[in-house]
Amino acid sequence: MRASALHSDVIVFVSDVWQTTCTAVRGGDEGFLIDSPVYPEELRALPDVLEQAGFPVSGLLATHGDWDHLLGRLAFPGASLGCAESTAQRLAAEPGDAQRRLRSFDSEHYVEGRPPLALGSLQRLPVPGRLELGAGHELELIAADGHTADGAAYWIPWLGVLVCGDYLSPVEIPMLSPGGSIDGYRATLQRLDELVRSASWVIPGHGAPLESDGARTILAQDIAYLTQLADQPEAVTLSPSRNTAAQRRIHEANLALPRA
Ligand SMILES: [Zn+2]
């Protein structure tokens, strides 16, 4: 797992698998941890690393309900997990699904010794909405669906940091999971566009943090990809930096997803 301090109040952890990101943000004597790394070793390291850095964890947040973003309580079992209302609804509709998918990942990769994942009672956050952090700071929640049917991006206005979930990834093309949609995905990118322009950092759900220009390049590539996918799916080309076997498999799955 890589850790980088983007700012004196923001640390980003990037997991060794799928480059799943986990963002710690501090506001005074409070702090949130958004999403999670994946491997047990990485989760075990978090409390010590954050304590040494003087980052309190007063609550956990998730950008969306895919299991690899929900593991924060394995590192902080006493903390409560907040998420968009849409994510809470999804998780309530598929009880135990995240735990089953985690088990299946662990069994596939011979990962042992992980305690069961208990999400606890979720704190449902209105989107769009605001969430207080410490004295005088508020995170803004922006609807971010399209990758899945649920989700929120977190804008940290006083630091110019956007934690956007599974959008704007330098390592993954737009992935339409069941429940996701091309139109929803494009609408989310349009909502994020203005924030991306004014951001000092954009932290995607997968891949290293991006400065504004890099994120804008990916946003343009992803709009172009989704437009081709909708209008001329047979003519789609993947951007050279993301044209790998794994990304071509995601593209095949996108093609197979039923259209509304
Ligand atoms: Zn993801």
Image: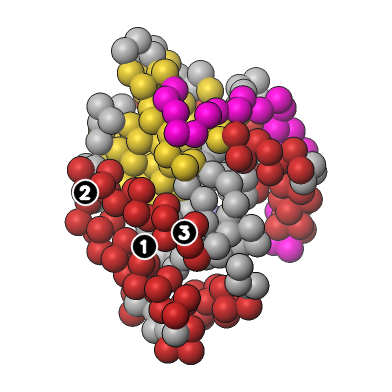
Q: Which residues are magenta?
A: 108-131
Q: Is residue 213 left or right of residue 16?
A: left
Q: What type is the residue that disc 2 sits on? A: Arg
Q: Is residue 123 magenta?
A: yes
| Identity of the residue drawn at 73% across and 53% down | 101
Q: Is residue 41 above or below residue 184?
A: above
Please tell me which residue is depicted at 64% across the width and 58% down the height of the picture.
179
Residue identifier under label 3: 185
Identity, as a three-letter code, of the amino acid under mark 3: Tyr
Mark identifier at residue 197: 2
Instruction: List the residue tagged with mark 1.
Output: 170
Image quarter in which the C terminus is found: bottom right
Tell me whether circle 1 and circle 3 mark residues in contact (CB < 8 Å).
no
User: Marks 1 and 2: in contact by CB < 8 Å?
Assistant: no
Residue situated in front as seen by the camera: 259 or 195: 259
Residue 185 belongs to magenta span: no
Q: Amino acid at mark 1?
A: Pro
Q: Earlier in the sequence, mark 3 or mark 2?
A: 3
Q: How many marks?
A: 3
Comes first in the chain, label 2 or label 1? 1
Asked if residue 129 shows in the view, the reply is yes
Residue 259 is situated, as x and y percent measured from the top left of the image, at 60, 72
Badge 3: residue crowd in 10 Å (few <14, some 14–19, many ≥20): many
Give coordinates of residue 203: x percent, y percent: 36, 47
Instruction: Out of 32 and 218, give the one closest to the viewer.
Output: 218
